[in-house]
Image (cartoon, rainbow, N blue to C red):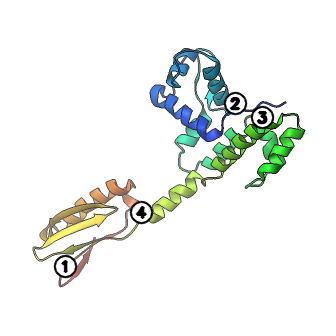
Amino acid sequence: MLSHPSSDLEECIERCKRVHDQVGTKQIGREALVAALGYRSLSGASIAKISDLRKFGLITGSRDEIRVSDIFMKIRFPQPGEDVQSAKLQAATMPGLFADLHSKFPQFPISEANVSSYLARSGLDENRAQAVTRDYLKTMEYVNSGGSAHASAGASQSESQPEVRAAADSDDILSFTAKGVSVTVTEDADKNALMLAREVIEVALARPQHSIPQLTYETDDHSKHS
């Protein structure tokens, strides 16, 4: 029988996040890995958890040279242009049995009955077939739960580019607001007001300066543009 994990991918990603939060990307030994996973010592349970991380390719190296893998880093911290879904699918199909299931049932969603029946006919007992089916379906649901990092970044950029406007009140005060962040300056600040507003909005949107939309301020009798 092909290798398969005893957990789903999302659960293993969460475990690997705990490891990365504590030790980063440096190499560690098995004892340190066990501790990072929340166990006091090597045991059947902790070894099984480590084995699942290996089967999904989330950690690499052996004994005293274990570290989180490049696949894990792509999933957790995707760079612009990297496809998170592809990285998830790569991890999901690392276990031999999961790769076989993906080849047999390439479309999503998948019939639970068909997967369970296929596993049972492949030699797994009924209880184990049901457990593997559950973990595989949860894994594929996680894989298909989001698009690529590039697509997500594009959507965020589109949503975070509203026109930034400011209006002068009776006290000749300009208040600039965007994405829940505002800055207030006196109207006679003119360009300085716009420059300050731009700096605040850049921080709020976390975008480079050239991507910030044109800033506008309005008074009762006229409008000016930066």
Q: Secondary structure at mark 1?
A: loop
Viewer-side label of 1, 2: 2
Tell which circle, 1 or 3, labels the residue nearer the N-terminal end: 3
Which picture quadrant has residue 29?
top right
Spatial separation of the CA atoms under disc 2 and disc 3: 18 Å
Q: Are marks 1 and 4 in contact (CB under 8 Å)?
A: no
Number of callouts: 4
Residue 111 seen in the current view? yes
* Among the two numbered marks 4 and 3 on one chain, the one whose residue lies closer to the N terminus: 3
* Residue at the farthest bottom position: 221
What is the three-letter code of the residue carrying label 3?
Arg
Q: Observer-nearest residue: 175 or 30?
A: 30
Vertical placement of 109 versus 224: above or below? above
Left or right of 147 on screen, residue 23: left
Residue 24: % across, % down: 48, 28
According to the picture, the residue beneath numbered tag 1 turns out to be 219
Q: Which type of secondary structure does the marked residue at label 3 adopt?
A: helix
Residue under pointer 4: 160
**Mark-to-mark CA distance, 4 and 3:** 47 Å
| Residue at 18% over, 85% down | 221
